[in-house]
Amino acid sequence: MAQLFTSAAPHVHSGDTVQKNMLLVILALLPAFAVSIIAFGWSALITAAICIAACVLTEWCISKYMLGQQPSITDLSAVLTGLLLAMNLPSNLPWWMAVIGCIVAIGIGKMVFGGIGQNLFNPALVGRVFLLISFPAAMTTWPVAKGFATSYLDAETGATPLYYLKHITKTGDVSFVDQLPAIKDAFLGMMGGSLGEVCALALIIGGIFLICTRVISWHIPVSILATVALLSWIATPEGMGAHEFIAYQLCSGGLMLGAIFMATDYVTSPMTAWAKIIYGVAIGVIVMVIRLWGSYPEGMSFAILIMNAVVPLLDRIAPKRFGEVAKK
Amino acid sequence: MHPPSLADNNTKTLINMKNTFRIGGVHPHDNKAYSAHKAIVEAPLPKQAVILLSQHIGAPAQPVVAVGDKVQVGTLLAKAGGFVSAPVHSSVSGTVVKIDNVLDGQGVPAPAIFIDVEGDEWLPSIDRSDTVIHECALEPKDIIQRIQDAGIVGLGGACFPTHVKLMPPPGKKAEVLIVNGVECEPYLTNDHQLMLEHGGEIIIGIKLVMKALGVNRAIIGIEENKPDAIEHMRSLAAKVLGIEVRALKVKYPQGGEKQLIDACIGRQVPSGALPIETGAVVDNVATLYAIYEAVQKNKPLISRVMTITGKNVQKPGNYLVRFGTPTSQLVEMVGGVPAGTGEVIAGGPMMGRSMSNIESMPANKRMSALLFMPENECYRPQPSPCIRCAKCIEACPMGLEPYLLSRLAKGEEWEEMEKQRVMDCIDCGSCVFTCPAHRPLLDGIRAGKAKVGALIRERQAAAKK
């Protein structure tokens, strides 16, 4: 008889893998990505392809030639980082800028810490913020959504709803309200912005998919969105309906993308239920502070990165222990 | 803090409306179809029975027979080695040929009594008839004495001597008996089949234990994947005042003592405390059947129902096996080791132990199952770095952070591990089962439990001086 294996219990496994989780997140991003292709045409596809290729290549080169490790690109985490970074870029960003963003995202955002699981900050956001600070003009000039008519090299550009909202809240000049896209458009897509910012509905569908497949829990997205909604309600400028202002705040900019896909990044978010809620609420507060009073129209990237830094502290919040359930 | 008494409370507050435990848990594929509903078959007698002296938690039993002694089925072979210990009886008739070590399932020598089998002579005091005896005139303390003398231990897996549980420490009072018919381990069907075939005897066992504990209420917890057992036990329990059957949602590890108490009465055993703190005493259905046989039929614990199963096993089923039967004979009985077997497990796949010795290892009180796993299912992928997905935290039924404990163990931070409640870990394996990075989280946690346990004992010893 053949030699028997002996191993410690348990002897069965759920079959879950890192790769499967990454794949599910990529799948969840596809509806939003599809909308961005409809909105920005080939340019969206080109930007995403460049980012994914650059991220995977960067990770492969660094693990192979600098760390001397077996590259673990098959876990799909670099693919996901590439796609997420692309979703955070304007579709007409010059290709070499996107590549620099990817090298920074993977190189400085992830590999310097030792690779997957070790990084403190969300790699895609490290890349995005690096680009935002280095190329502020290119990063804040969004093409107008014109479908496949959108040119990659020479697109017509326009301001985003957040720009108008910023103006309204700063100056109290509600005449700009007319410039805002209809709420329906903001929700369904077809407004200016980064690839992943155009369609709140597609992002929400992805989020529900991730929660149902138990890839992420509801705590972080729900607490971010609820906090933003609450603060928007409080801060509604005169001359605008509260529900209208809340809807614009929720559907515009990187909020939905950030709340569902960026802030929930496993490696850089807290692990227990209450810590996740605190983290989400804090992100919501920081976003609204930046949106209402900061000099940038959008603050999602900064809010998430700031809270990433607090995660080691939040991780000290223990889960609900057995035997500590509230007495009924 | 004392829990509210059953008598002066609305019973509603004592029911966990969710019908399952409230923290963590996982859903492994149950794989019970291979042996489910297979009638219990008696395994043939061995030529030589090897009776282990330690088949329970606590001190090993001390032999009271000598080489050359003639024994019958039921003869006391070894007396309990202390209060937390259990006596061991002969499961066969014949001659004691040696008292020596036998290699256990992991190839470690374990003291045992070897008996060459001659015929099948039972002690005349044992009632071998099929008559079910309902009435019992014994006083509670006499019932407990019989249970103790019969060598009964928890047959759910832990093998904790049952009489100890039935004698709560001073100041503690049992309020309810919880009967474990959950059988949450995948593949296992022995308790299920026992309920179907011997439900009536189990109910009598429950009544005996209720009398011994002085409680007027018992809850039988059975998972919903055994609807026939639920219905059968319900119809039997309907005739008895105070016994109810609770259908529980399927979730592993519901058969864990603490999880089952939570699922049934909505109370959680505090960290470091005994289950009696919640007013509950938990006994497995197989244990209750053994109690029935011991008290009403005068039969000591000499055999148990085992599930022998696996994907490619020729004759999977539920077998009544006399203790001391070597594993090799059980293997032969079900048609030999299936081709392509990679691992043989004593017990279920979540908490059972891999065996390296499937020859001489004798059946014993602890061995609830023999499971043959195909080689392609034994393969464990290489672990990759933790991605902090928190699935281990969501899975842990004790509300611990397995990733953190495992990391602390690597750094040998024992004190911090103690603060993070490593001693609460019940070894259920849910964290490893669920980990997408295939990290061997329990290795570090088990090391930590051993080390922290030793540190706690040291501290207690120092405090006594």
Image (spheres, coloured by chain):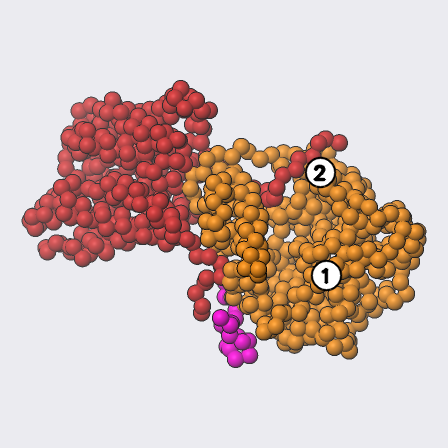
Chain colours: A red, B orange
Picture layout, residue B186 above or below residue A265: below
Residue A8 locus on image (x, y percent): 61, 41
Q: Is the residue A111 above or below the residue A278 in the image?
A: above
Q: Tell me the chief SS of the magenta region.
A: loop
Please state which of residues A204 and B135 is positioned toward the viewer in this rendering: B135
Is residue B28 visible to the viewer in this orientation of the structure? no
Residue A211 colored magenta? Answer: no
Task: Identify the mark at residue A257; answer none if there is no mark.
Answer: none
- Looking at the image, which residue is at 48% across and 34% down? B384
Crowding at dot 1, Cα within 10 Å, few <14 / some 14-19 / many 20+, comes out as few
Residue B134 falls in which quadrant of the image? bottom right
Q: Amino acid at mark 2?
A: Ser
Regarding residue A288, the answer to whether it shows in the image is yes
Amino acid type for the residue under numbered disc 1: Gly
Label 2 crowd bin: few (<14), some (14–19), many (20+), radius 10 Å: many
Residue B284 left/right relative to A251: right
Q: Name the residue beneath numbered marker 2.
A: B356
Residue at 46%, 52% (x, y): give it. B420
The residue closer to the viewer here, A11 or A167, is A11
What x and y, as percent, mark residue B209?
69, 70
Q: Residue at x 43, y 22 (%)?
A: A68
Disc 2 is placed on an element classified as loop
Q: Which residues are magenta?
A: B1-20
A205 left or right, relative to B12: left
Protein chain holding label 2: B
Q: Image point 21% across, 37% down: which residue? A: A193
Label 1 resides on the chain identified as B
Give the Cα separation between the discs numbered 2 and 1: 31 Å
Which residue is situated farthest in the front direction here? B465
Residue B165 in picture, x, y percent from top left: 65, 65
The residue pinned by badge 1 equals: B82
